[in-house]
Image (cartoon, rainbow, N blue to C red):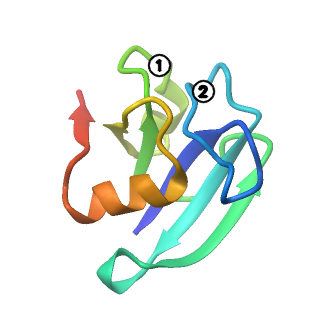
Amino acid sequence: MHIVIPVKSVNKEESIVAPTKEATSYAFLELGEGMQIVAINFFDALPQDFFDYIITPDKNDNLDEAYELGARALLARAGMSIDEIVEALMFRELDEIM
């Protein structure tokens, strides 16, 4: 599974989810078996590669570009770290934005 998380820092330990309009970069995660992080890369703009989900803390976030790429959107709580988001994915605790 591939997910994209808009963040305000490129340091994994300090990366907190942010709305796309406030993000300084995008974390592109490849998740393997058991929702383990296989790879993580940071980009200055929304990656144009295939990804399954984009995670945002704002249900009114402008996600048109992600939708055009075929991604689905999930809602995270404000202030969640990358590790907290991955854990929430594992336990299916994030709601889908329709």
Residue 23: x percent and y percent? 68, 30
Up-down relation of residue 30 to residue 64 (above or below) = below
Measuring 50% from the left and 19% from the top, which residue is drawn there?
62
**How crowded is the residue under tag 2: few (<14 C-alpha within 10 Å), some, or many (20+)?**
many
Residue 51 seen anywhere in this rendered image of the structure: no
Q: Quadrant of the C terminus?
A: top left
Tell me the kind of residue under disc 2.
Thr
Measuring 36% from the left and 74% from the top, which residue is drawn there?
35
Q: Which of marks 1 and 2 is nearer the N terminus?
A: 2
- Near-viewer residue (74 or 10): 10
Measuring 61% from the left and 58% from the top, which residue is drawn there?
28
Tell me the kind of residue under disc 1.
Asp
Residue furthest toward the top?
A: 60
Residue 60: x percent and y percent? 40, 14
Specify whether 71 is left or right of 5.
left
Disc sitting over residue 61 in the figure: 1
Residue picked out by circle 2: 20
Up-down relation of residue 39 to residue 52 (above or below) = below
Q: Quadrant of the N terminus?
A: bottom left
Q: Look at the numbered disc 2 and give the secondary structure of its residue.
A: loop
